[in-house]
Image (tube, helix red, strand yellow):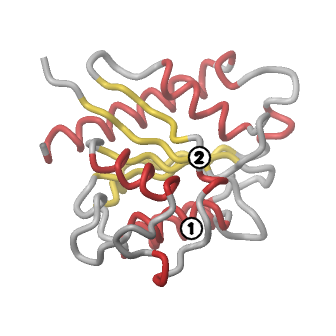
Amino acid sequence: MLSTTILTLVGSLRAGSINRQLAEVAASGAPEGVEVKVFDRLGEIPFYNEDIDAEGLVPEPALALREAAAVSDGLLLISPEYNGTMPAVLKNAIDWLSRPFGASAVSGMPTAVIGAAFGQYGGVWAQDDARKSVGIAGARVVEEVRLAIGGSVTRYAEIHPKDDPETVAQLNEAVRVLAEASISVA
């Protein structure tokens, strides 16, 4: 049986983040044969600096991120929207994953971007910026996956996203489509 691994990066470092909760729901509802792994060390990775991106100098958390990507079949970015764009921690992860130029671990990797935000449009600007950045970094953006959950703070004020059937169904579908795109590349 085929096994597909989807590396998931959450753009919010906050422990109680709704976007982190979405990642948990995505992992728990993944189809059979698909493993969704959340990389929880984005806050440890220093800002990208080419001076330290050399053999023997790459910080261990950045190296761990690259290694996690290298053994994955797909990439799922889950992002809130900060001041109309993606959080710096997510952009920084994309920058580290974009190297070495032309031969990065995400080169050609099927990638989807989803997320939730307080605003009514659910962070679409952040998601569009993340798609643009990761696409330029060499990933193959799966455009069919679009999930922007608006009004997240009020929508999930009393419940966890796992208790919202519509959210669960949307996340399951997003992971299924990304997994199928990942299998077709393998």
Q: Quadrant of residue 136?
A: bottom left
Q: Earlier in the sequence, mark 1 or mark 2?
A: 2
Q: Residue at x 45, y 26 (%)?
A: 172
Mark 1 burial class by Cα count in 10 Å: few <14, some 14-19, many 20+: some
Q: Which mark is residue 91?
A: 1
Horizontal side, residue 162 vs residue 181: left or right? right
Q: Callout 2, which amino acid?
A: Arg
The residue closer to the viewer here, 53 or 25, is: 53
Q: Which mark is residue 41?
A: 2
Horizontal side, residue 91 vs residue 80: left or right? left
SS of the residue under disc 2: loop
Q: Callout 1, which amino acid?
A: Lys
Q: Is residue 111 above or below residue 171?
A: below
Q: Is residue 85 above or below residue 21?
A: below
Q: Is residue 83 above or below residue 24?
A: below
Q: Residue at x 28, y 50 (%)?
A: 70
Where is residue 85 drawn, in percent x and y? 67, 69
Where is residue 23 drawn, in percent x and y? 57, 34
